[in-house]
Amino acid sequence: MMTVASLSAQSSFNKLYQNYLAGERNKVDTIEDMISHLKSYDHQNENEFTKCLTPLMILLESEKESLNDEFLQKLNEVSPRTNSSVAEFISPSGKFRIHYETSGSHAVPSEDINSNGIPDYVEEVAEASDSSYNHEILNLGFTDPIGDGEVYDIFIENLSSLGAYGLTNNRSTGSFPCNTSNPETCIYIENDFIGYPPNTDPEGEIIGSIKVTIAHELKHAVQFAQNGWRGDSDLWAEMDATLMEEVVYDNVNDYYNYINGFSSDLFNSPASSLTSGSYEDVTWALYFHERFGEKFWPNVWGIIESNDQISMVGAIENELILREVSYDFSVLESYLWHFASGDEFASINYGFDERFEYPNPSLSATYLELQSALTDTLSLNPFSARYFATDLIEPTDGFVKLDFEVSSDDVHLGLLGYFSDGTLETQTAIGNSNRLTGSIETNWAWGNVENVGLVVMNSNPDANGLYSFQFTKYFIAEEIELAQNFPNPFNPSTTIRLSIPQNQEVKLEIFDLLGRKIQTVYNGFVQAGFRDFVIDATTLSTGVYIYRLTSDFGIQTKAMTLIK
């Protein structure tokens, strides 16, 4: 099994890019420092892998009109070509032209098991190109970066001296020329992947590196075809391209190298702002893919392609609106998935498909006993979260309750209840300007949960959020209670709450004033605690209705009024 966090830290190249994304460096200085870093790169340092050079190409594209010849000469010095024994191979689909060398420092491995005169390494690159194209373009429906009758160029070069897996470029000058204007971009890929970070490909780590690099770089080509690497979305380009590695090649898992300690990942550093997403945030993108299906991201990028002024987050929110899903809840749920990961907090019934292989979440605090008062007011960075948990030393009675105060409706809270049978349940409080002080009252008996997790999330991309909370408990009446529906009168929906002292069978029904049954709301088993039932009266007429509860404690009835 591959160990998560093979790379202990992100490379200096990526730190420069992250600092630029965070607004801490200007673009031209970032470009120059990136080039200087590549010129002095120490390929003996196994923790300094750059991964992808496309961020530099994206920055160069946006500044190409302002860069002078001296500056471009520095770029040319990064990785000069040897151009010895250059050969070409067309992929089986006819879509890709693979350029490779058989001698010199850029030579591919010479192994040719099928004795067809084409090195196996080259054929693997060609196969990965066709496979990635079929999945990303033909299956998922992303914009095709290869026009009808065109052939896409892929150059195999020694990129290990730069610590890179590959890059996508659209420039006809510089050290990574595309040589042709159509298609507009081309891909460069490492020539042997010896000594690169591990992956879990059953066919071997080198083949796995080929696969994910092609899938990653082809997605960069798609991005350029959709919006020319312009606007807000290019800041999320690496997260998006890394996602394609997992989507196209689920068994490779090279992305495990970047989700633990690589930068501000959502497992170890949730309090760092998610904006803008890079390699380490791939699991945030993966949440939407696994939660809403494989068409989610093609739809989001379709929105971006049709509106070059929209932000990535705005496009995501628009797609969720079309699906009638709450954006705030989805972002909070993504953090809940990240909490419910690793060998400590993963559950059998919740979260990512590969959650047991992920890192444990980094907790801000663990509470060994229930609190008697709210915590001191805490601050949460823009677009970030914090994780907390309980691990009670002494058993306690009552039901799990969380009291909270927040500064705005951008602050959201989610609880995760871990039960002794390995299952998990969640309950959330989504921001509401009328509910800055409140409680989450669960139906989880403290005696039935092993521990409780808490995620506090700030969805505001620009401003800090303030919050305080306390883990506590509540008790309910000794007999079942049927509450008055709220709101009342109502139109067209209302909620009926039950307070249930013990697990039992219940039946909740609605009747008109003539005693005719209108609806059976629920008939079955309920756990102790509070249980809310939402009544939709869209098809009913204005009037008074009776709702009746049958339980182990007898029959209770109340009246509710529908006004249309």
Image (spheres, rainbow, N blue to C red):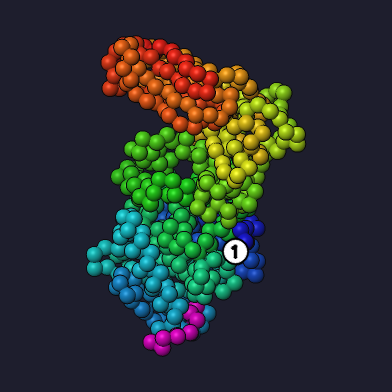
Query: Magenta part mainly helix, strand or loop?
Result: loop
Q: Quadrant of the N terminus?
A: bottom right
Pick the residue in front: 287 or 376: 287
What residue occupies the far right of the structure in this picture? 393
What residue occupies the far left of the structure in this picture? 148
Q: How packed is label 1: few (under 14 Cα within 10 Å), some, or many (20 or more)?
A: some
Tag 1: residue type? Met
Pick the residue in front: 546 or 354: 546
Q: Quadrant of residue 7?
A: bottom right
Q: Quadrant of the C terminus?
A: top left
Residue 351 can be seen, yes or no: yes
Q: Is residue 108 magenta?
A: yes
Q: Is residue 123 above or below residue 432?
A: below
Q: Position of residue 506 (x, y in %)?
A: 47, 26
Label 1 element class:
loop
| 492 to the left or right of 424 | left
Q: Which residue is mark 1?
A: 2
The magenta-colored residue range is 106-117
> Which residue: 27% across, 68% down?
150
Q: Is residue 546 above or below residue 361?
A: above
| 543 to the left or right of 229 | left
Q: Position of residue 469 (x, y in %)?
A: 64, 27
Pick the residue in front: 60 or 209: 209
> Which residue: 60% across, 63% down?
2
Q: Position of residue 479 (x, y in %)?
A: 57, 19
Q: Position of residue 111 (x, y in %)?
A: 48, 84
